[in-house]
Image (cartoon, rainbow, N blue to C red):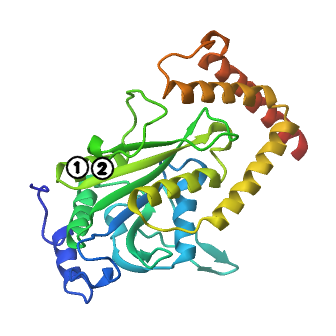
Amino acid sequence: MPCGRRTLGGVVVRNWIARLRPGHGDGGIFDGLPDGVRPTMIYAFDGFLNAGSAPRLALEHLESRDEGEVVHTFDLDDYYDYRARRPPVVFDRDRYSDYEQPSLELRLHRDDHGAPYLVLTGPEPDFRWEQFTEEVHELVEEHGVELVVGLGAVPMGVPHTRPSVVTNHAVRRDLLDRKNLFRAQVVLPASIQSVLEIRLGEWGHDALGYVAHVPQYVAQVEYPSASVALLEAVAHRTGLQFDLEELRLQQAETVADIHKQVEEQDGGEVLAGLERQYDQMNRSATEPLVADESELPTPEEIGEQFEQFLAQLDERESGTSD
């Protein structure tokens, strides 16, 4: 299918040059895959769908297990708004140094059993989304990618005391591997993740994604529980093997710290309401009727309690800092 008009010096030329480099387009970089098995591409971007820094923590964990190698670098001058997201630079007495240039890269990694897979990560493009999706499309075809998997995380009214909820979406329903707990039709602001998945489906490629639900009260801090849930979902779907022990240790420490803060801020009632709401929705996913529904707090009541809890938390933190 047509991918859209491309100009000389753009996507086509960059990828044509890339194909001339050793190891590109010849399948050699995927030694270790059984015959007939094609690689998976995993992607996540900074800037959106990143509640609890869950996708970032997940990919950082994978990189800590295997540094990998860069197989493609995107030209950020095409996609990045430097004035909206100014990269940091150090001013040391009388000179500038240590400019942290952002990067958007496709890297080759290997799982704990040596199976290769690709990871696409970096800042979400600010500009030229269609051009970017075309460039990713060419990489998918160039490397014979079988499945493209996106990772994301959103803040939701869920408690940290229950297993992390993961919503599954895909270009076709037969690609889904789980029943979503939260089922609704909503209009959302588009992201490069959503556009990329739509376009890949239109071009005939298998693409899906997992979005972890992060408790609203920890959405602005690192929440490893959601990262573990995302990587478990990827491993289950793709067969890739990831040792998550270190990430689970971080998860246990974070949950213990949240428990402590909830107790100190008298958040037990709010937490109990979130737990009841979660349990109700969990039962509703498998049972047509649930008894005693009238005993559950309404979403509005949960929201009011939650706002009161956050206000109390802000007041006490301000008092501590004074």
Question: 310 left or right of 89?
Answer: right
Question: 144 left or right of 256?
Answer: left
Q: Residue furthest top?
A: 294
Residue 229 position within the rendered picture, expressed as x and y whole percent measured from the top left: 55, 52
Q: What element carries label 1?
A: helix
Q: What element carries label 2?
A: helix
* Residue type marked 1: Gly
Tell me what residue is drawn at x 31 percent, y 48 percent. 175
Residue 122 position within the rendered picture, expressed as x and y whole percent measured from the top left: 44, 64
The residue wearing badge 2 is 197
Q: In which quarter of the image is residue 108?
A: bottom left
Residue 155 position within the rendered picture, expressed as x and y whole percent measured from the top left: 57, 39
Label number found at residue 223: none
- Give the Cα distance between marks 2 and 1: 6 Å
Question: 311 left or right of 195?
Answer: right
- The answer to whether residue 249 shows anywhere in this view is yes
Quadrant of image for the N terminus: bottom left
Residue 283 position within the rendered picture, expressed as x and y whole percent measured from the top left: 55, 27
Label number found at residue 201: 1
Q: Is residue 80 above or below residue 105?
A: above
- The answer to whether residue 99 shows anywhere in this view is no
